[in-house]
Image (cartoon, grey):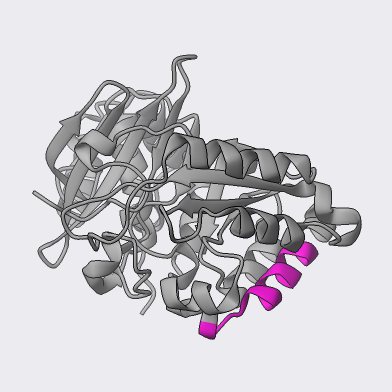
């Protein structure tokens, strides 16, 4: 069943009450420009309309409820409660240049069971509705924060949730969030139908592919999805994406000590990405130091600094553009792979 977003409901209410066309823009202006979080406070609207909006949609513009916020120097993580008594997490990252970036969830839990990920230990509770996805950002917006960029790298596999595409439509709508497509990043473990749909419908949105091992057998062991969508097929889809969009594709690679951080792994990653024809220069590798939590298996540890440097040297010597992701938020379990609805 398709969930009707609050934005569609507002249009229907305005139409039912035969309101002038500009009303919708007034309401969106109140939310997105003036950061008004309750319908009754939108005093520019007639009282009967404020009452009707409150009756239909509840007091608060935001449909998810912040339960707890954890903060460290550059990161804040918010635990939200959502309908059905479940919880999700979203993360705000503040960069020294003043840029604010957000990592938001698309599912409550995740069903793909990647071995090193805390979220995967929960299993999949449910997909989030488009509005539950975008309201994570709305919460920060209403609290006066700029939304400079957003990545779908929170809980869940973004491309496994069909509501992702409705969420992208809300985020890029100029009357609503008005986010530029290039300020949005979708991360995937390699779901081919979703990659192809993203290429068709949102070609300018950034795409990140979680690789984590260049060897099929090992990747299947770490990430069971590899049995359904093998590496070779995913890379061909990414080649097509680059050919059609002319945009970079980011390869995310979590370094696990003694598991996937050897020189042989670095060589194999380079070999996978070289020789891909005219598109090969548009692959960029993001190396991510592993973050442990109390629920991820003890046998995974962060690679040591020297090992990471050696990995980078090999990739760069083969002409692969590479960065090591700066670690934020591991002290509050807000870093990559750590989101776990913990209270």
Image-based side of 38 in relation to 248, left or right: left
In the rendered structure, which segment of residues is drawn in magenta?
A: 227-241
Q: Is residue 38 covered in magenta? A: no
Question: Is any part of residue 173 visible from this angle?
Answer: no
Can the viewer see residue 83 in this picture?
A: yes
Q: Position of residue 173 (x, y in %)?
A: 55, 45
Instruction: Tell me what residue is drawn at x 61 percent, y 75 percent.
Output: 192
Quarter that holds the N terminus:
bottom left
Residue at 26 percent across and 59 percent down: it is 118
Residue 228 magenta-highlighted = yes
Q: Which residue is most to the right? A: 278
195 versus 318 height, above or below: below
Judge left or right: residue 20 versus residue 299: right
Q: Which quarter of the figure has residue 91?
A: top left
Is the residue 223 above or below the residue 46 in the image?
Answer: below
Residue nearest the viewer, comparing 55 with 249: 249
- The relative height of residue 117 versus residue 80 in the rendered view (above or below) is below
């Amino acid at each position: 069943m398709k969930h009707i977003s609050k934005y569609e409901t507002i249009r229907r209410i305005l139409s039912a009450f035969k309101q002038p066309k500009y009303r919708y823009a007034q309401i969106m202006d109140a939310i997105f420009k003036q950061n008004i979080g309750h319908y009754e406070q939108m005093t520019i609207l007639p009282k009967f309309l404020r009452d009707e909006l409150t009756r239909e949609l509840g007091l608060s513009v935001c449909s998810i409820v912040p339960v707890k916020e954890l903060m460290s120097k550059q990161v804040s993580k918010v635990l939200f409660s959502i309908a059905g008594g479940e919880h999700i997490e979203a993360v705000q990252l503040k960069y020294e240049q003043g840029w604010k970036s957000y990592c938001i969830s698309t599912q409550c839990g995740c069903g793909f069971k990647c071995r090193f990920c805390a979220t995967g230990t929960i299993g999949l509770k449910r997909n989030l509705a488009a509005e539950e996805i975008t309201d994570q950002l709305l919460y920060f917006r209403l609290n006066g924060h700029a939304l400079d960029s957003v990545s779908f790298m929170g809980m869940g596999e973004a491309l496994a949730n069909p509501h992702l595409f409705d969420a992208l439509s809300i985020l890029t709508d100029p009357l609503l969030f008005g986010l530029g497509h290039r300020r949005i990043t979708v991360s995937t473990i390699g779901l081919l139908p979703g990659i192809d749909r993203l290429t068709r419908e949102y070609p300018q949105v950034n795409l990140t592919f979680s690789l984590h091992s260049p060897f099929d057998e090992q990747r299947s062991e770490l990430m069971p999805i590899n049995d359904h969508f093998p590496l070779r097929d995913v890379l061909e889809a990414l080649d097509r994406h680059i050919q059609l969009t002319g945009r970079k594709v980011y390869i995310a690679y979590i370094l696990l000590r003694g598991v996937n951080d050897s020189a042989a792994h670095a060589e194999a990653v380079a070999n996978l990405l070289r020789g891909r024809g005219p598109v090969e220069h548009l692959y960029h590798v993001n190396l991510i130091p592993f973050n442990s939590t109390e629920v991820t298996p003890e046998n995974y540890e962060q690679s040591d600094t020297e090992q990471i440097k050696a990995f980078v040297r090999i990739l760069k010597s083969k002409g692969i553009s590479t960065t090591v992701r700066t670690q934020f938020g591991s002290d509050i379990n807000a870093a990559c792979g750590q989101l776990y609805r913990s209270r």
